[in-house]
Image: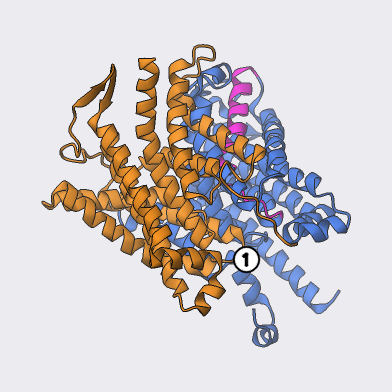
């Protein structure tokens, strides 16, 4: 291994260890706590998914929240029909993944801008679609689906949960469940992206012509990326519903999709280094910004400004910043970007 | 038949607001190659500026004019300061930037003017009565909104077609390098494109508040989707296409809600999904829209 590769591996191991330590400490820290920590975990999962579609494969998707809605409603539907909540998570991933695949097919014909338009429209229309009375047999129309007290639900609502003889509060259990899944999904994504599929995704992103002439099946990889990204969102949405024990159209507004985009851009599209920071930023900015003003517009104004500043000053996000800081001084001095 | 005409008239009125917003989107796209996701939120923001002016004792139409000027200047500055670095960059930068503007302006409207719902305009800008044209009631407000829209469009067309400024605007959008060589200040022209779009958006916002009171920070969210549908139907590059698209979408949505006796679509819920479906169908069947031209790119 070259010295650079060794340095990279050590840095990755350190970052990973620090992240694990943070995840283990966070619920005990009163500024984070179980509920916000778990929500940060769902953002984390959705951001990883969006990064696969948009960051690595270059297809702009503004509808990650819409796929979360599909996953969340899958879980809500199955739990009310007697399926244990934990088993609904993979089903939610599958259902959302299928929908992602289906959206990926027309997306093949749409170039960047148009795809952004369509997915934005989907994100805005999703709450109305859920509330549409033709779908009410699945979604109960505009009303929310209450799962509280269901015996198929972790803690049947918010009761204590006993796992392997340990009893913890419901919120703590959801926290660990969310982050256990998040870590597994992160590792899966990491393995996927450093292997053959990841190389193919990046090739498609950087030049479709070059990718196709190197034997990469463009359509297959684009739809695959969409399906995987949507499946990740499905898991995130499912966990969100399990955590609050109800599903409502307004749990998945267009704003959710945009929040995930903000997180992904801040984390750095096309890199896995900054995801935890991106998730933490979108989760805790509303908490911190209360100090500026309690008005609900403040976090949005800051999200928006942050997005603009990042595009203008730091197109590679936090990950790019880390990479630049970590590269040897000589490279920084003698290369111009 | 009168019922049909009645619905067409109502559709034209809401459609002209979609047309205005779509027109702004098309002007920006043509001049800078960026699709402005923030067009609706910018319109809301400027409408709140008009509310503040009226609140400080300026008359409605005075505030109307002032707001348009403020929007013109604001759009110009926005392009010069924020948008310029992403022009000619990969599409995704422009999308993220204008999504950022969308979130920023939405947040600012909520922050500065609180999330309160306000009655605005204080008195109706147009008389509330209606004309009766052969059994079809045409409200003076609908007619007024449509008339102002059409006048604006004619003015814009005259500007682009018959003035030196309009020629410079078109030239900078078409070929910036050549335009610079013949002495056009291309940067100013691109800024002016954004300024014009913001000003037209301000009119759309003011009329949305007038046609569907009260004034609410989220009022332009659905309108933006209809405007996107209108712009896409028109081909995203054609101002006339955007206007026709906006009117068509206003009328079609209204007619579907009136004559939908088979599907029982529950139109209040599916207006947005229908617009989305329309966008998707047009893009898949005819990606250049009804008025766009095929662009051939060298690879």
Picture coordinates of residue B105 (x, y %)? Answer: 38, 54
Q: Residue at x 37, y 21 (%)?
A: B5
Picture coordinates of residue A237 (x, y %)? Answer: 59, 37
The furthest residue to the top: B261
Please give the chain letter of the residue carrying mark 1: A
Picture coordinates of residue B235 (x, y %)? Answer: 56, 46
Q: Secondary structure at mark 1?
A: helix
B247 shown above or below A143: below
SS assignment for the magenta stretch, majority: helix
Residue under label 1: A319
Q: Residues within 10 Å of mark 1 (few under 14, many from 20)?
A: many
Q: Residue at x 27, y 26 (%)?
A: B138
Picture coordinates of residue B130 (x, y %)? Answer: 22, 26
Chain letter matching colour blue: A
Q: Is residue A116 visible?
A: yes
Q: Which residues are magenta?
A: A57-82
**Is residue A244 a member of the stretch shown in magenta?**
no
Image color mode: by chain
Which colour represents chain B?
orange
Q: What number of labels is visible?
A: 1
Picture quarter with the C terminus of chain B: bottom right
B69 shown above or below A33: below
The furthest residue to the front: B162
Give left or right: position of B20 versus A85: left
Q: Residue at x 45, y 75 (%)?
A: B184
Give left or right: position of A296 versus B123: right
């Amino acid at each position: 291994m070259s010295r650079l590769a060794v340095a990279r591996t050590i840095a990755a191991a350190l970052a990973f260890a620090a992240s694990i330590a943070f995840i283990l400490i966070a619920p005990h820290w009163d500024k984070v706590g179980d509920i916000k920590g778990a929500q940060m975990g769902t953002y984390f999962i959705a951001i990883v998914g969006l990064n696969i579609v948009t960051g690595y494969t270059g297809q702009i998707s503004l509808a990650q929240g819409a796929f979360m809605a599909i996953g969340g409603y899958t879980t809500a539907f199955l739990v009310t029909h007697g399926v244990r909540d934990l088993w609904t998570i993979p089903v939610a991933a599958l259902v959302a993944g299928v929908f992602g695949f289906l959206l990926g097919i027309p997306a093949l014909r749409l170039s960047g801008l148009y795809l952004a338009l369509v997915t934005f429209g989907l994100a805005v229309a999703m709450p109305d679609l859920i509330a549409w009375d033709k779908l009410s047999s699945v979604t109960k129309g505009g009303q929310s689906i209450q799962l509280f007290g269901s015996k198929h639900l972790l803690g049947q609502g918010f009761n204590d949960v006993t796992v392997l003889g340990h009893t913890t509060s419901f919120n703590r259990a959801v926290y660990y469940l969310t982050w256990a899944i998040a870590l597994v999904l992160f590792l899966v994504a990491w393995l996927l992206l450093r292997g053959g599929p990841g190389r193919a995704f990046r090739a498609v992103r950087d030049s479709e012509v070059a990718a196709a002439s190197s034997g990469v099946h463009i359509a297959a990889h684009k739809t695959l990326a969409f399906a995987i990204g949507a499946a990740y969102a499905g898991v995130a949405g499912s966990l969100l519903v399990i955590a609050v024990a109800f599903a409502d159209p307004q749990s998945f507004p267009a704003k959710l999709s945009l929040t995930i985009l903000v997180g992904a851009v801040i984390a750095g599209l096309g890199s896995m280094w900054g995801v935890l920071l991106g998730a933490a930023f979108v989760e805790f900015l509303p908490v911190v910004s209360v100090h500026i003003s309690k008005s609900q517009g403040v976090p949005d104004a800051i999200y928006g400004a942050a997005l603009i500043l990042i595009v203008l000053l730091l197109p590679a996000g936090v990950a790019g910043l880390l990479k630049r800081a970590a590269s040897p001084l000589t490279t920084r001095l003698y290369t111009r970007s | 038949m009168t019922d049909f005409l009645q619905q067409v008239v109502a559709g034209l009125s809401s459609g002209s607001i979609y047309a205005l917003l779509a027109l702004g989107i098309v002007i920006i796209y043509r001049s800078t190659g960026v699709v402005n996701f923030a067009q609706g939120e910018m319109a809301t923001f400027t409408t709140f500026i008009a509310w503040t002016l009226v609140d400080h004792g300026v008359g409605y139409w005075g505030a109307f004019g002032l707001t348009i000027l403020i929007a013109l200047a604001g759009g110009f500055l926005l392009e010069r300061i924020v948008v310029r670095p992403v022009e000619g960059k990969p599409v995704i930068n422009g999308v993220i930037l204008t999504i950022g503007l969308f979130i920023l302006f939405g947040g600012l409207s909520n922050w500065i003017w609180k999330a309160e719902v306000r009655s605005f305009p204080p008195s109706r800008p147009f008389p509330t009565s209606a004309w009766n044209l052969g059994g079809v009631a045409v409200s003076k407000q609908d007619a007024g909104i449509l008339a102002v829209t059409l006048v604006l469009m004619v003015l814009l067309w005259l500007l682009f077609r018959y003035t030196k400024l309009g020629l410079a605007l078109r030239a900078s959008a078409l070929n910036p390098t050549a335009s610079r060589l013949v002495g056009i200040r291309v940067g100013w022209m691109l800024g002016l494109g954004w300024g014009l779009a913001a000003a037209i958006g301000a009119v759309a916002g003011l009329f949305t508040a007038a046609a569907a009171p009260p004034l609410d920070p989220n009022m332009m969210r659905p309108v933006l989707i209809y405007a996107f549908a209108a712009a896409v139907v028109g081909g995203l590059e054609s101002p006339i296409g955007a206007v026709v698209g906006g009117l068509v979408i206003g009328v079609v949505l209204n007619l579907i809600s009136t004559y939908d006796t088979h599907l029982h679509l529950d139109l209040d819920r599916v207006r947005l999904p229908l617009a989305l479906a329309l966008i998707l169908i047009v893009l898949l069947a005819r990606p250049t829209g009804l008025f766009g031209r095929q662009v051939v790119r060298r690879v």
